[in-house]
Image (tube, grey):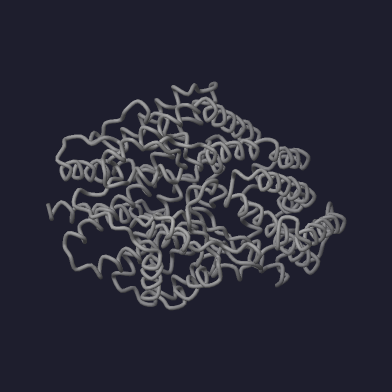
Amino acid sequence: MTTQSAENLPTWDLTHLYSAPDGEDLKADLQKGRAMAESFAATYQGKLAELDGKTFAQSLKDFEALEDVLGRIVSYAQLLYAGDNTDGKIAQFYQNMQEEITNLSSLILFYTLEINKLDDDVLEDLLKDEAAGAYRSWIMDVRVHRPYQLSDDMEKLLMEKSVSGKRAWNRLFDETMAGLRFPFQGEEVTNSEILDKMSSSDGAVRKEAAKSFGKVLGDNIRLFSLITNTLAKDKATEDQWRGLERPISARNLSNLVEDEVVDALITSVKESYGDLSHRYYALKAKWFGVDQMDYWDRNAPLPEDDDRQIPWSEAQETVLKAYGAFDGNMADIAKRFFEESWIDVPPRAGKDSGAFAHPVTPSAHPYVLLNYHGKTRDVMTLAHELGHGVHQVLAAKQGALMADTPLTLAETASVFGEMLTFRSMLDNETDEKRRRIMLAGKVEDMLNTVVRQVAFCDFERRVHDERKKGELTAERLGEIWMEVQSESLGSAFRFDEEYQHYWAYIPHFIHTPFYVYAYAFGDCLVNSLYDVFQNGHEGFQQKYLDMLSAGGTKRHKELLAPFGLDASDPDFWKRGLKVISGFIDELENVL
């Protein structure tokens, strides 16, 4: 991107939340939140079992209102920090807000703990009240953790120590990654910039970027290994106290998905490595005229790709047009992100290198962060994050307690938005060469979403399992990474020595262990959903919007039932994987 085009890219307006980190409106909300938390504790702590249905309903409303206030404050701090991890004052503000919100959350932690202590028959009596019954789904989700709940004092200690424990290690990782600079052609470039160069059409550029990225990660690998080992040990200790036997189980619980469903997904994907990634990358090697590609060619444009820079205005129009063709309401919601400054697009030093959609709270609105470099993949990323954003807007009516969805379902709207955009672009492309390039690009994106993320999950599983026996050296972490990558990507690649350090930059390993399988879950789910849509399922659009609007009020079985789908059926995953396999078949046929 040129400097001029970067200057024209939109940035978000966080004054929708608060005027400034030292603004009077923020101070007022902090004071309000503190008063609400103290009043809530004084009114309800130790008394839930004695409440009648009407008073219990009021406690739920009070708790939800408090969560909204606290959520707005901490979201503001998180968004400011995401915009610039390297500003000392912002980092200090972010830490102070985390500590303040943790302290207030600690005051009201008793509430969910006491809900879990209620006998089933007592709870059912309380939920007979209509206002209380409206929160049933949230309460049932809370009670999923009931068998693994510790004493009140232990739960409070874990929450309060998180600020100086795992959250501090998260912050160390973020600030270290944001501060790294990578030598490239006589300049020092950021994480986002060097990763973008690794998908350049120029092989020499890809190689130099890949080597530089791996070397700088290697220069810092002892620190990244320490962070990883510490967080894995911290998780193992907590899991042991809670009685969770498998490292992945805590994530499955919070995702409200059964272990066996996740196991079926992972097994199905791993069994499909040969038919998917191995087959496609062997095909790509042929296009490059080689038997084996270097690892930096994995995301390389095809040799005949013109690597056209896509203007931001075109990217915006492309996504909105695709959304509008599916449903006008979806496009109208997506437009608000552009028209009302809910999106931050230009790459810049200190900014988070990836992309996300932050729901903030239902009383406010979501924000989207991108790093737009003008590639086709960036258009897909825009479609992905706007999908999240539309989902979050639609689900906001469920309130602060029930708007959020589990990670597995949170990826549904984002991946569906990508698919809509891709199909729209493909259908409007008349040049056969461009269509082939687009199809190959979509396959690569799907492999990155399904195969690569399951391989990431496999890496985490092996690291966490081995960590129980003692600390892993940086060399051992690299060995596991290389084994998992070779298994998932196949024999079409050569991996040089520095590639062993590439595990170190994946933020999900640090922030949200075992998050990664949610991408594969979402992609396969959407492939199955889209298959239903293409087959002319009656009323699909409205059913789809109803599904998004449900937020966290329904489980995956309830949400998928109107479409005749069931994620607990092994054929469900095979159906989703067949979509990717079919695209590869199509590419083989045009060789």
Q: Is residue 248 above or below residue 112?
A: above
121 lies left or right of 590: right
- Quadrant location of residue 323? bottom left
Q: How many marks?
A: 0
- Residue in front for this viewpoint, 275 or 350: 350
In the displayed structure, 513 sits above or below 547; it is: above
Q: Quadrant of the N terminus?
A: bottom left
Left or right: residue 489 compared with residue 259: left
In which quarter of the view is residue 398 placed? bottom right
Q: Residue at x 46, y 63 (%)?
A: 8
Tell me what residue is drawn at x 39 percent, y 56 percent: 378
Q: Answer yes or no: is residue 454 visible.
A: yes
Q: Is residue 36 left or right of residue 113?
A: right
Q: Residue furthest right?
A: 42
Residue 74 sits above or below residue 469 on the image: below
Q: Which of the pair 386/38 is nearer the observer?
A: 386
Image location (x, y in percent) of residue 424:
30, 69
Q: Is residue 348 left or right of residue 307?
A: right
Please give the name of the residue rendered at 35% of the width and 29% of the height, measured from the top-left corner. Answer: 483
Q: Residue 286 occupies which quadrant of the picture?
A: top left
Residue 435 image point, x, y percent:
21, 61
Tell me residue 471's x, y (percent).
54, 22
Q: Which is more toward the observer, 136 or 58?
A: 58
